[in-house]
Structures are given as structure tokens and as C-alpha cells.
Image: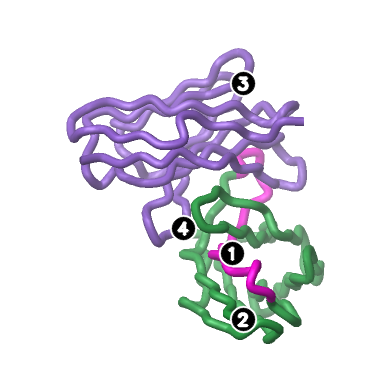
């Protein structure tokens, strides 16, 4: 059983550009959450998708947007990249209420130059 | 709001030493509590969890007990190994259908031979 997968592994972008990160949830999971982990810090919740809709959002600007597809996979889009967007972006999948546990992918390391 | 506080690192221990990483939380109600571990260059792995007061989570020699009276979830291991070197995150999740995870800042552990 494949766990949560993310692509790409690493990405380098220039300020002002746009980026799309992808996530496939663990088999049987229908909820996908995205987190941003800056260097030396704990992950911060960006938003969560369920039934193809954004269900909850953390304290991130509208430059951060997402999408969930009918097969439950998800994309995170960031527009007008800033140097401060450089971070490890983690995707987590879950089944609501199942021990309230989220399964994390290996992350995408985004570097903005 | 809900938050997690954990002891600052880095923590450096000799192999076979006793480990304690303190964690306290602030939350309404009775959240689920977690310890996640992040090895160098990798994503997050769930180490252990507890979903109600007085529960003890355990895995790979690590233990933590959910203490409601002190709002704590301290991580312990009786004898650390070099392979335990990693960053450890204490986290909580409220028991709602929107089960985002709130993380502490992380504690870096280095175990030397």
C-alpha cells in the first residue's frame, strides 16, 4: 500500500513566478491537508481539502490556492513567489475522525531565488 | 487559541542516556496528542499518539503519557541510540471533523557514540 506521495521532490523558482506542487493521498483517504515548514520551524497549516472543496484555511494569503480532484489527489499553487516562500511543503492525508491521525508525505523542498 | 510548547534544543546526549523532551499544550476540550519525528532530509513520521487523558502512547522504546491535569505530553526513552538523532515535534489535533494538526517548534536531538 503506497503511502502519501508528493512531486516534485525539489524545485527552484525565481521571485514572482508561480509554482504547482502535487500530492497523492494514502489509499482510502479522502482528505488532504497542506503544511508549510520553514527551516528550523514546525509545520504550519495552510489549508485542507475534502470533497473537492477547501474546508478550512490557515493564516496564509490568497497567493496560496489549491485544488482537489475526484480521485482525491491535490495540488497546491503559489503565485507571485516571494523569497519567504522557500520552505518544505508537506502534504498529509486522513480519514476524518479516524483517530484524528494524519499521514504525511516526504515533502517538496521549494527554493525561491 | 490552541498551541503547543516544547523544550528548546538542540539536545545532545551520549548513547544509552535517558531522554526527556518536555511538551505542554493549550487547547479547549480534550485534543488528541502526537509526537512526530523528522529524520534529516525527510518528511514527518508519526512516532506515537494518545487520544484521551491518562493514555500512554509508545513506539520504538519511546513513551509519552497524556496528562490532562498538567496539560503535558512529555516524550521519554530509557536508552537512546545514535539512530534516534532527529527533530521531534509535539503536536495536537482537536477532535473535530476538521482535523488539522498544530505543531510545536520542534526539538533537535543529537546522540553521540
Q: Earlier in the sequence, mark 2 or mark 1?
A: 1
> Is A35 drawn above or below residue A63 in the view shown?
below
State the separation of the CA atoms marked 4 and 3: 26 Å
Residue A28: quadrant of the picture:
top right
> Is A42 drawn above or below residue B80 in the view shown?
above
Using the image, name the chain to which the residue with label 1 belongs: B
Q: Mark 2, mark 3: which one is toward the viewer?
A: 2
Name the residue at 74% across, 81% down.
B79
- Magenta span: B81-99
Location of mark 2 (residue): B113
Looking at the picture, do discs 3 and 1 lie on one chain?
no
Q: Mark 2, mark 4: which one is toward the viewer?
A: 2
Q: Secondary structure at mark 1?
A: strand
Where in the figure is residue B64, as x and y percent of width and height?
Answer: 73, 71
Which chain, by letter, is purple?
A
Q: In what quadrant of the picture does the C terminus of chain A appear?
A: top left
In magenta segment, residue B98: yes
> B6 or A107, which lies in front?
A107
Location of mark 4 (residue): A42
Left or right: residue B106 versus residue B66 is left
Using the image, name the chain to which the residue with label 2 belongs: B
Where in the figure is residue A109, as x and y percent of width and height?
Answer: 41, 41
Left or right: residue A36 versus residue B60 is left
State the separation of the CA atoms marked 4 and 1: 9 Å
Using the image, name the chain to which the residue with label 4 belongs: A
Location of mark 3 (residue): A72
Kindly check if marks 4 and 3 are in contact, taking CB atoms under 8 A apart as contact.
Answer: no
Q: Colour of chain B?
A: green
Amino acid at each position: 500500500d503506497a503511502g502519501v506521495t508528493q512531486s516534485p521532490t525539489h524545485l527552484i523558482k525565481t521571485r514572482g513566478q508561480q509554482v504547482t506542487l502535487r500530492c497523492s493521498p494514502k489509499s482510502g483517504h479522502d482528505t488532504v491537508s497542506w503544511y508549510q515548514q520553514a527551516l528550523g520551524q514546525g509545520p504550519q497549516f495552510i489549508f485542507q481539502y475534502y470533497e473537492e472543496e477547501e474546508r478550512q484555511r490557515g493564516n496564509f494569503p490568497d497567493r496560496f490556492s489549491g485544488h482537489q480532484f475526484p480521485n482525491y489527489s491535490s495540488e497546491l499553487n503559489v503565485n507571485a513567489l516571494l523569497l519567504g516562500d522557500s520552505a518544505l511543503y508537506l502534504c498529509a492525508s486522513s480519514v476524518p475522525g479516524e483517530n484524528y491521525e494524519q499521514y504525511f508525505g516526504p515533502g517538496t523542498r521549494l527554493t525561491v531565488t | 487559541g490552541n498551541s503547543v510548547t516544547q523544550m528548546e534544543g538542540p539536545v545532545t546526549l551520549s548513547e544509552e542516556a535517558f531522554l526527556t523532551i518536555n511538551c505542554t499544550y493549550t487547547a479547549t476540550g480534550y485534543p488528541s496528542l502526537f509526537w512526530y519525528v523528522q529524520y534529516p532530509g525527510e518528511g514527518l513520521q508519526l512516532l506515537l499518539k494518545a487520544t484521551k487523558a491518562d493514555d500512554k502512547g509508545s513506539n520504538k522504546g519511546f513513551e509519552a503519557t497524556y496528562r490532562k491535569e498538567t496539560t503535558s505530553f512529555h516524550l521519554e526513552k530509557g536508552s537512546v541510540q545514535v539512530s534516534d538523532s532527529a527533530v521531534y515535534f509535539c503536536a495536537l489535533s482537536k477532535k473535530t471533523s476538521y482535523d488539522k494538526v498544530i505543531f510545536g517548534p520542534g526539538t533537535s536531538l543529537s546522540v553521540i557514540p
